Image (tube, rainbow, N blue to C red):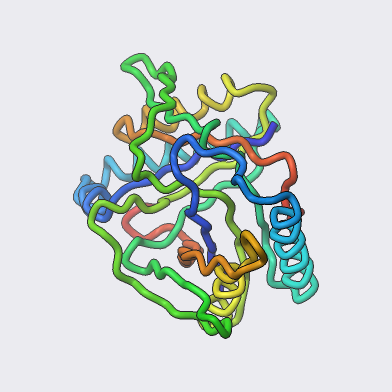
Amino acid sequence: MKYILMMNTMKAGHGVPDWPKKDLQAHIAFMMSLNKELHERGELVSGEGLSFPDQAKLVRADKNGRPITDGIFPESKEFLAGFWIIDVDNPERAYDIAARISAAPGPGGAALNMPIELRPIMSTPPQEMV
Amino acid sequence: MKYILLMSGTKAGVEAYHAWSKEDIEAHMGVLRRISQDLTESGEFVATQGLAEPKEAKVVRGEKNGVPVTDGIFPESKEFLLGYWIVDVPNAERAYAIAGRISAVSANMPIEVRRFAAHEAKSG
């Protein structure tokens, strides 16, 4: 079963978090070690980190199909910071992995306990869409 | 440069889409397939994925001892990711043009465009 785990923790306009360098490094080292472990277990399909929200754009097509870009977002908007696609045997395993990501170290090495949104990937589009 | 194009919507928006006529949904899906095909032919296609419905979403937090706590209650206003496209293009303008094409065929929905961080996790 494929799931996507989403870290929706970023706020509009924000760039690199204002953490001490060693705390940022510990956070990244934790993520790299987790990715390596998931890869070795054959559970990691893909994982990516996104650039910070201060570089995000919203694009709409105008009447002629040309892109209109906008970089203004409501303060309350949650931005995707990164995601993992995993292939696991059951939902419980997906919840366990999400909980580990949730507890990634933050400033001072304390667990962030951030919420991780978890969604099944559509294996095939719903019947009415094909 | 790799970009991700994110299509998001609320639960109400997803319900409105399900109320489209079968022909309209077929035409919409047909153009999306065509866009993926064009991107494959131009060598810009990396990945695309549709997600299951927002009603299947859970939010998970780790407890102090690392035990997962799941919750499925979200505010009505929450925007859920519906699907995404990852493209590898020479510049941001090309990513915006692709997003514009997707927007044009999807009721002019806004498509969020984000560049990948320089330090990407390696694909499995």
Q: In the figure, is residue B23 to the left or right of A34?
A: left
> Foreground: A68 or B63?
B63
Q: In the figure, is residue B43 to the left or right of B52?
A: right
The residue depicted at 34 percent of the width and 50 percent of the height is B79
The residue depicted at 31 percent of the width and 53 percent of the height is B78
Q: Position of residue B47 (x, y in %)?
A: 61, 46
For the N terminus of chain A, which image quadrant?
A: bottom right
Q: Position of residue A125 (x, y in %)?
A: 43, 57
**In terms of image quadrants, where is residue A30?**
bottom right
**In terms of image quadrants, where is residue A89?**
bottom right
Q: How many marks?
A: 0
> Eyeballing the image, is A76 above or below A86?
above
> Foreground: B60 or B95?
B60
Q: In the figure, is residue B17 to the left or right of A12?
A: left
Q: Position of residue A39 (x, y in %)?
A: 76, 68
> Foreground: A94 or B16?
A94
The residue depicted at 51 percent of the width and 39 percent of the height is A14
The residue depicted at 30 percent of the width and 63 percent of the height is B74
Q: Position of residue B49 (x, y in %)?
A: 52, 52
